[in-house]
Image (cartoon, rainbow, N blue to C red):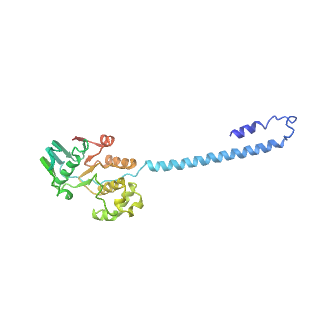
């Protein structure tokens, strides 16, 4: 544009005496060159706009993650878990992890356990799983409990453990072991942005975020009265967090959660239990 303007100014009013080497034909040459330059500028601007539109399309796809789905079950009793004057202590410890704890979990509530690391949040979750006859925690013998911890009969729980070290082998074997429909399981993992190349790898080679997505996907496919998620957002990317938050807002399942993300807790919690 600067070159064109400069040369346009030289097209008018030159002095044939002072500039004998210039001829009238020079005007036509400069005009043609200016027109060519303006055409190049216009073509460049068009290409720039097209590339910007393409990038905006990519950003739109990223910023609108696919909505997840959940299949919460309804129990015939309103109150699912009751804790009263409850204390928990490990056999080799001198003092209780916590004591005189009291709260309830009713249908439709999202109860968050809050407290510093080591205050007993995960231990309380294990005690509830044991009270609800969840198979993996029936052999837990190190905990000594006192008080009331009751779960209603036939309570179905879907659990996301904060520990992912137990994930071994391939995703197909995992789906088979947990009675998950393989096609739906893989489709859900893709919705959580797990790349297809991961489907052929062993889970011990996954990142912590990818392992957590496997546990969350399995939990979402498990119909349950109560969803217990222990630090589900650890290592999870921001867009997957958005998906999970929108899922809970939409389906409003009954949940017991441990999560250090203050914004997530304040937005979704119907009850916060301080330990």
Q: In which quarter of the image is residue 119?
A: top left
Point out residue 16 in the picture as x, y percentages from the top left corner. Answer: 86, 36
Point out residue 28 in the picture as x, y percentages from the top left corner. Answer: 80, 44
Quadrant of image for the N terminus: top right
Quadrant of image for the C terminus: top left
Residue visible at 76% across and 45% down?
32
Q: Nearer the viewer, residue 184 or 88?
A: 88
Q: Which of 66 and 179 is in front in this view?
A: 179
Point out residue 96 in the picture as x, y percentages from the top left corner. Answer: 15, 44
Number of numbered callouts drawn: 0
Report the side of 193 relative to 248 (left or right): right
Report the side of 60 relative to 258 (left or right): right
Residue visible at 84% across and 41% down?
24
User: Farthest left residue?
Assistant: 147
The answer to whether 160 is drawn above or below residue 1 in the figure is below
Report the side of 180 relative to 191 (left or right): left
Residue visible at 59% across and 47% down?
48
Point out residue 122 in the picture as x, y percentages from the top left corner. Answer: 23, 48
């Amino acid at each position: 544009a600067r070159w064109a303007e400069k040369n346009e100014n030289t097209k008018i009013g030159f002095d044939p005496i002072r500039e004998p080497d210039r001829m009238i034909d020079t005007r036509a040459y400069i005009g043609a060159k200016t027109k060519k330059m303006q055409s190049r500028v216009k073509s460049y601007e068009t290409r720039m706009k097209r590339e910007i539109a393409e990038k905006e399309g990519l950003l739109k796809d990223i910023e609108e993650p696919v909505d997840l789905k959940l299949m919460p079950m309804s129990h015939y009793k309103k109150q699912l878990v009751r804790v009263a004057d409850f204390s928990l202590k490990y056999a080799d410890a001198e003092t209780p992890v916590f004591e005189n704890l009291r709260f309830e979990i009713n249908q439709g509530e999202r109860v968050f356990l809050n407290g510093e690391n080591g205050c007993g949040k995960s231990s309380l979750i294990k005690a509830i799983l044991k009270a609800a006859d969840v198979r993996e925690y029936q052999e837990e013998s190190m905990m000594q409990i006192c008080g009331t911890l009751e779960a209603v009969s036939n309570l179905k729980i879907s659990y996301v453990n904060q520990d992912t070290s137990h994930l071994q082998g391939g995703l197909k074997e995992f789906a088979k072991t947990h009675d998950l429909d393989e096609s739906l399981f893989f489709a859900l993992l893709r919705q959580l942005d797990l790349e297809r190349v991961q489907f052929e790898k062993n889970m011990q080679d996954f990142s912590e975020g990818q392992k957590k997505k496997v546990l969350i996907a399995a939990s979402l496919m498990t119909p349950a009265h109560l969803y217990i998620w222990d630090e589900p957002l650890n290592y999870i990317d921001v867009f997957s967090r958005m998906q999970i938050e929108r899922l809970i807002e939409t389906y409003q399942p009954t949940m017991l959660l441990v999560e250090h993300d203050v914004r997530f807790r304040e937005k979704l919690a119907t009850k916060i239990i301080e330990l």
